[in-house]
Image (cartoon, grey):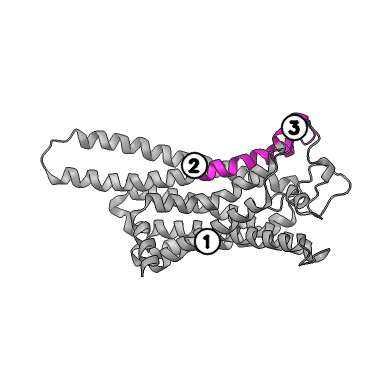
Amino acid sequence: MKTRERFIKLRSILKFNAFPMKNTDCFGIGLSSMNQSDCPEVRIPFPVFFAVGALSLAENLLVVAAVIWNRNLHSPMYCFICSLAAFNTVASLAKTCENLTMALADAGQLRMAGSSETKMDDVVDSLLCMSFVGSISSILAIAVDRYITIFHALRYHNIMTMRRTGAVLAVIWTACGVLAVPMVAFFRFNFIKIVLVVFFFASLAIICFLYVYMFMLALIHARRIAALPAGGGRKYHRQGRRGGNMRGALTLTILFAAFLVCWAPFFLHLIILMLCPTDPYCECYRSLFELHVLLMMSHALVDPAIYAFRSAELRHTFRKMFCS
């Protein structure tokens, strides 16, 4: 099968099988069913997929290495950021290996067929499912950490101990690893797709609520502090501490926005697939499929740039790693 045809078939989480059809592969997608409308299908060159996957892999490995290498970054927030980067690394590694395998097969240097190809697809899909659930779980953990930092600052170090942080990360990684395989094995059932969509939007709702609540209360606190009599270092100390915490919350808000922009089109694609699989207007949106896949992959590319741009400590660590 040619590389272009295989990319059209979504080598990622989704296994399209909204309605039965002939001449489908192990993902349940028929070539004749991909776009039955008048909308031309958007095509992304194969080298673009490969370049994004390889570059995002290198970037996220660098973030993980920086957090491990610098003891100053051994805090709950950076541990959750490291977890997010690690899940992005898993996704980037899976897609890069798959892209490399497909390139070699397309060049005639590697031959894969039958059960071997199916097993590789299932492994990649499982890793991508794990990466998605782990990424949004890590962002949710970061949101809770920022909430505790801002509104329970005096008790923060008693609440968010490194032991509890490790326990949270262990639960996230174990749950993602356990759930990834059955999610792929039973993805042909709409129930699994519905669970993923509900999990996605429920997590978004919780994160949005936490951030809106944080910024509203922070604004109220800022007004109260500004109303205090001037002249005392305590006022400026409190302003500086809360300002630093709010900068951290703003960084994580940017991370959340990037996640939403990169993943929401794919989940809208999934919803449309379940609700109107044969409608020509829905097919027009589905013609952007490869662009949605590229956006998903770009999430792992964007996150490290946000870390480096927003965190002075990470920038300092990167400089020391490259200059030492």
- Of circles 3 and 2, the one toward us is 3
Q: Position of residue 74 (x, y in %)?
A: 37, 64
The correct choice, above or below, for 86 with respect to 204 in the image is: below
Quadrant where the image shows the C terminus: bottom left
Crowd tier of the residue under label 1, counting other residues whose Cα lies within 10 Å: few below 14, some 14–19, many 20 or above: some
Q: Cα distance, mark 3 to mark 2?
A: 29 Å
| Callout 2 amino acid | Ala
Q: Is residue 289 magenta?
A: no
* Secondary structure beneath label 2: helix
Mark 1 highlights which residue?
58
Q: Residue at x 74, y 45 (%)?
A: 190
Q: Cα distance, mark 2 to mark 1?
A: 22 Å
Q: Residue furthest left?
A: 231
Q: Is residue 271 magenta?
A: yes
- Of circles 2 and 1, the one toward us is 1
Tell me the chief SS of the magenta region: helix
Mark 3 and mark 2 lie on one chain; the one further toward the N terminus is 3
Mark 3 and mark 1 lie on one chain; the one further toward the N terminus is 3
Q: Residue at x 53, y 45 (%)?
A: 259
Q: Position of residue 58 (x, y in %)?
A: 52, 61
- The quarter of the displayed image where residue 254 is located: top left
Mark sitting on residue 91: none
Q: Cα distance, mark 3 to mark 1?
A: 36 Å
| Callout 3 amino acid | Cys
Q: Residue furthest bottom?
A: 324
Q: Mark 3 near mark 1, Cβ–Cβ under 8 Å? A: no
| Region of the chain picked out in magenta, as a range | 257-285
Residues 190 and 39: in front is 39
Mark sitting on residue 257: 2
Q: Residue at x 40, y 46 (%)?
A: 251
